[in-house]
Amino acid sequence: MLDLVIRGADVIDGSGSAGVVTDVGIEGDQITLIGDAGPAHQEIDGTGLVLAPGLIDTHAHDDGAFLRHPDMTFKLSQGVTTVVSGNCGFSAIPFDPESDPRKASGGILSGLNGAFTDLSGYFDAVLAGAPAINNMMLVGHNTIRSLVMDDPKQAPNQRDLKAMSGHVERALEQGACGFSTGLIYHPGRYSQTEEIVALAELAGRTGALYTTHMRNEGDHLLDAVEEALRIGVEAKVHTHISHHKAAGAANWGKVVPSLARIDAAIAAGQRVSLDVYPYTAGSGRMIEYFNLDRINRDLAEVIRIASCPAYREYEGQMLKDIAKAQDVDITDLVRDILTAPRGADTICIQFIIDEQDVEFNLRWRDMMVGSDGIPNLRGKPHPRLYGTFAKILGYYVRERALMSLPEAIRRMTSLPAATFGMTQRGMVRAGFKADLLLFDPATVQDTATYDEPQQLAAGIRTVLVNGKIAWQDGQHQMTGSGQMLKYRAGAYAG
Ligand code: CU
Ligand code: ZN
């Protein structure tokens, strides 16, 4: 007898095909039957609802959250069953328990602690806490560079490069799906293209990915795209461009030539993919965006404070409003925040993206969705942490009709599963893992806002992770059935 059957839902299988009303049967952690099902130990009525594969967040910074918040409510509650962590050059591994984890993680990976040093050890540490969802990992350039180099502003010598290569190879051997960079951040910004080619090439050898937060997303976006494509060609590696955008009003619209250039590379045979988050604001550590000797006033004008250990009262406020209320110059305010005790840990939200560009990105045929959520739950985090996927389904699919529902599901399930080498995931198909999402297409909607960012998505009925009911009607089931995934090249071949 089946362990579980979901009866009569409109099954959108993740392939891009239209839905079919049928039953889906589950035994253990697998989907074993699609079609008329007999009795089962447990039944779920799917009438009037859509059943889809669990969603995949291609751009997460959840490395530390898996240790600190294994319930992963901010992702699970939206129907996300798998994330790709270790993005933007920051990863939990390699890890040196002796050194300050903030140094290597750039302060965005909350809660890094433990005795692990490599990916296998990290996976064991996470599994010991029974995580609610699945995780796949990238190994990050900034982390490795901080760990290996005494002076990260220098170019690496042969010994440094060998040590960095060793860390990348070890992570790939242990199941990482690729190598990530964050070339606007410290210390990645000091690296030359050749260094990245040498390290990305190691990922290329195993068929894994090179993912990049490019060197520039604003005035020099198009140059940065050229560099990313060049790295892909020279390192013979699949290049994945993270959170594609044109930052700053002067650059709005540049996503059009940028995507055209990427289309040309793909037409010429290069493997390139992308993701985007569906918001007009970015978010990150405030100190990374400012030069204290020459504070960018225009940028300061569009910044809101998410989390600020030095001044909790600033959280949720725009810098310009704080400056006005205190009658201080906004550049002095920025300097004061960043030089205060723990000022470097301040997380900000920057309103730097044009809504038209977001829509242009989402219309691109194979655009994937990555939340880029920063799981720092103090203060007012960017709403993308809790809202990204429900916003795609509710706002961009149902209200704006930028794409059909089966197409949106494909972009958030089978496409990322195939791209990131996930075996037997991303489709509702017999023999695949039972990562499933049952939701109401008429009511699904994000409710997380900039003012109230930690609100749960509406319209999500049931989420299954590896065959277990992990989320039901707004209630976490604490089944802890998430797995740590290992990259497999050609997971979808044939
Ligand atoms: Cu990121
Ligand atoms: Zn990034």
Image (tube, rainbow, N blue to C red):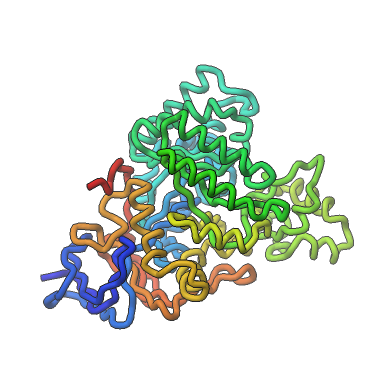
Residue 358 in percent (x, y) is at 57, 60
Q: Quadrant of residue 155?
A: top right
If the image is split into quadrants, where does the N terminus sit?
bottom left
Seen as rendered, the residue at the extreme right is: 327
Considering every residue shown, the one lying at the far top of the view is: 158
Q: Residue at x 46, y 65 (%)?
A: 389
Q: Is residue 454 left or right of residue 41?
A: right
- Could one spot residue 477 in this view of the protein? no
Q: Residue at x 44, y 57 (%)?
A: 365
The x, y position of residue 395, in whole percent, is: 51, 72
Task: Find residue 129 and report its horizontal and vertical position in percent.
Answer: 37, 54
In the depicted view, which residue is nearer to us: 183 or 152?
A: 183
| Residue 29 quadrant | bottom left
What percent of the width, then of the height, locates residue 466? Answer: 27, 60
Indicate left or right for 292 with 256 as reference. Answer: right
Q: How many marks?
A: 0
Residue closest to the eye, 301 or 339: 301
Vertical comparison of 162 with 70: above or below: above
Q: Is residue 181 left or right of residue 411?
A: right
> Residue at horizontal 49%, vertical 67%?
402
Q: Can residue 277 be seen by looking at this rendering?
A: yes
Residue drawn where x is 39% and y is 33% of the image? 204
In the displayed structure, 390 sits above or below 427; it is below
